[in-house]
Amino acid sequence: MQHMLRKMLDSREPISKIAATPVDRRGFLRILGIGAAAGAMTPLLAACGETDDDDPVVDDTVDDDEPVDEPDDDDDEPAVDPDEPIDVDDVGEDVVIFGSAVDIPNIDPAVGHDGAIAETQKSLYDTLYRHQGNPPETIPWLATGHEVTEDAMEWTFEMEENATFQDGSPVTADAVVFSLERLLDVNQGVAWMFSGVMDADGVEAVDDHTVVFTLDTPFAPFLHATTWLFVVNPDVVQEHEEDGDNATAWMVENSAGSGPFIIRRWEPGAIYEFESDPDYWRGWDGPRLQGYIRQVMRESSTKRLALENGEIHAGDWISVDDTRLLQDHDEVIVPDEPAIGTYTIKMNHQSGPTSDIHVRRALSYAFDYDAMLQVMEGRATRLHGPVAETVPGAHPNLNYFEHDMERAAEELAQSEEWADGFEIVYAHVTGLEEQRQTGLILLDKLAELNIEVTITPMEWANAVAMFDDPEESPLLFPIYSGTDYPDPDNFLWQSFHSTSAGTWMGANHYSNPEMDELLESARATPDDDEREQIYHQIQELAIEDATEIFIFSELGGIIHRQEIQGYEFTPVMGSNIFWYQISLD
């Protein structure tokens, strides 16, 4: 058992192994709460009645004695109680309150990169292009347009001349050069989009408003990559640099951008408040939000009640059960948009039983995909491989894994070390009920293979910290993967190229030279038809290696009250909602 994960488990109240007695499919779905009589939130313990040491128990307690980033003294304690909605009378007019299940650990454009972080970065910073609409299109933002050579090696961008940073100084081509150089130097966050195809010498400011990128190798999705090059104010960054750190310490919770919002309040773990910049260089079409408040609200039911009562205007990570209830509320809008994100279980390829390909194949066959789709109650479609069918380049005829316990047993029997069964930890993000129920499906089916599963929730920040080391990273961890851009490269490179191992997308720690070569070849191929054929090979190899358990692609859109105006869903990470477009009725 992995050292750090075991240490975390041992520091908590005991978590009973979930060595479930197998039940039939109908009985198991009843335990999950699928059907008219039971809710998906119903605890397994209540469904089973009293238990003894041999009965299945799911312990969802969280160790409140060891929170992440505990403040040093009482003066630093958040003034707002997480999960307790803010009194709407305490905020100004035209201020949106958004309830979110997740924290914002680091907004530095050269470091932080997940859904909540990206959404915040897109409010504070601007990029040459941005994604908008569904299906998403790349539209000029800081740029007025671009030209690219036939070999896709040189990209020239003309920039808006009136763009200014929030301190009033101009956004110039030199700032773009500085931002890329800083990103490559820090080498975190989205650096992977650029580091494999160019170096810092490959970007040049021809004049104040013309910037040229010269690549070392063709990179067909490069225009998509520019939507993630957040342009920072060089003067502000250099002013806050300490000991050559590129201002990374200061930039964790401060911004140096030109975006439409500025930070007003920052209370990690509780509340983040943003105020609109009335002097934003693009101006404001129609009514302008005074600002928005992002309140950390872990529990789905809390957000549902707050939406129903008008205590928040919108919320994320709302469970299927709560979504169903909100669909019947006249003042709440539940979008039902096609999306391109994926939901998979990352299997650690470098440690424990999941380092064995036969174990990974056995788990892939054992998982009950139909049961999970029933949990989602029509708000998801089956994922056959690593790329959703809505993404151009998705393989149309993959030989994918289906639920088959006989084949699962056959695969497990081929394992030299693990054929007789084993114990395994399935970890998931605290408060995400669908992830917990994914674990329940695993425990039921894997018990038939003499595999005992322990389910444990953990804070996302703790999980991300553990992903870095394959010996400490959870063996099984479910991941919702948004997309940085609508291209197979986005999903496949981050999940399967060896350089991504240890990131949250690369939590599988997968490494295969054949896969690396294919991924690099696809990136360097400017011809769309040729690229598509290479991506088909990559998807086939991902299935052959049983890289992850591919489960579903969820329907998208932020649930919000009818007072929200101007909402447009864009299925790109961080663009679920673009606050610049939002107003209140």
Image (tube, rainbow, N blue to C red):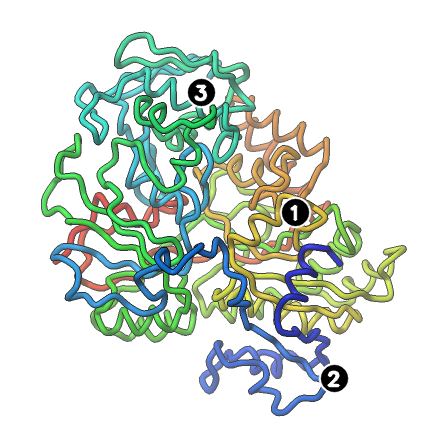
The disc placed on residue 54 is 2
**Residue at the bottom extreme, as displayed:** 50
Amino acid type shown at disc 1: Asn
Q: CA distance from mark 1 to mark 3?
A: 29 Å
Q: Earlier in the sequence, mark 3 or mark 2?
A: 2
Q: CA distance from mark 3 to mark 2?
A: 58 Å
Q: Are marks 3 and 2 in contact (CB under 8 Å)?
A: no
Q: CA distance from mark 1 to mark 2?
A: 32 Å
Image x and y of residue 436, in percent:
55, 68
Residue in front for this viewpoint, 7 or 151: 7
Amino acid type shown at disc 2: Asp
- Mark 3 is surrounded, within 10 Å at the Cα level, by few (under 14), some (14 to 19) or many (20 or more) other residues, namely some
In the image: residue 238, left or right of residue 195 = left
Q: Earlier in the sequence, mark 1 or mark 2?
A: 2
Q: Earlier in the sequence, mark 1 or mark 3?
A: 3
The vertical placement of 321 against 195, above or below, is below
Question: Considering the numbered disc 3 on the image, is that residue within a helix, a strand or a loop?
Answer: helix
Question: Considering the numbered disc 2 on the image, is that residue within a helix, a strand or a loop?
Answer: loop
Q: In the picture, which quadrant includes the C terminus?
A: bottom left
The disc placed on residue 508 is 1
Question: Quadrant location of residue 60?
Answer: bottom right
Q: Are marks 1 and 2 in contact (CB under 8 Å)?
A: no
Question: Considering the numbered disc 1 on the image, is that residue within a helix, a strand or a loop?
Answer: loop
User: Residue at point 29% right, 32% down?
Assistant: 257
Q: Nearer the viewer, mark 1 or mark 2?
A: 2
Image x and y of residue 306, in percent:
28, 70
- Mark 1 is surrounded, within 10 Å at the Cα level, by few (under 14), some (14 to 19) or many (20 or more) other residues, namely many
In the image: residue 336, left or right of residue 72 = left
The disc placed on residue 181 is 3
User: Residue at point 54% right, 68% down?
Assistant: 62
Image x and y of residue 138, in percent:
34, 32
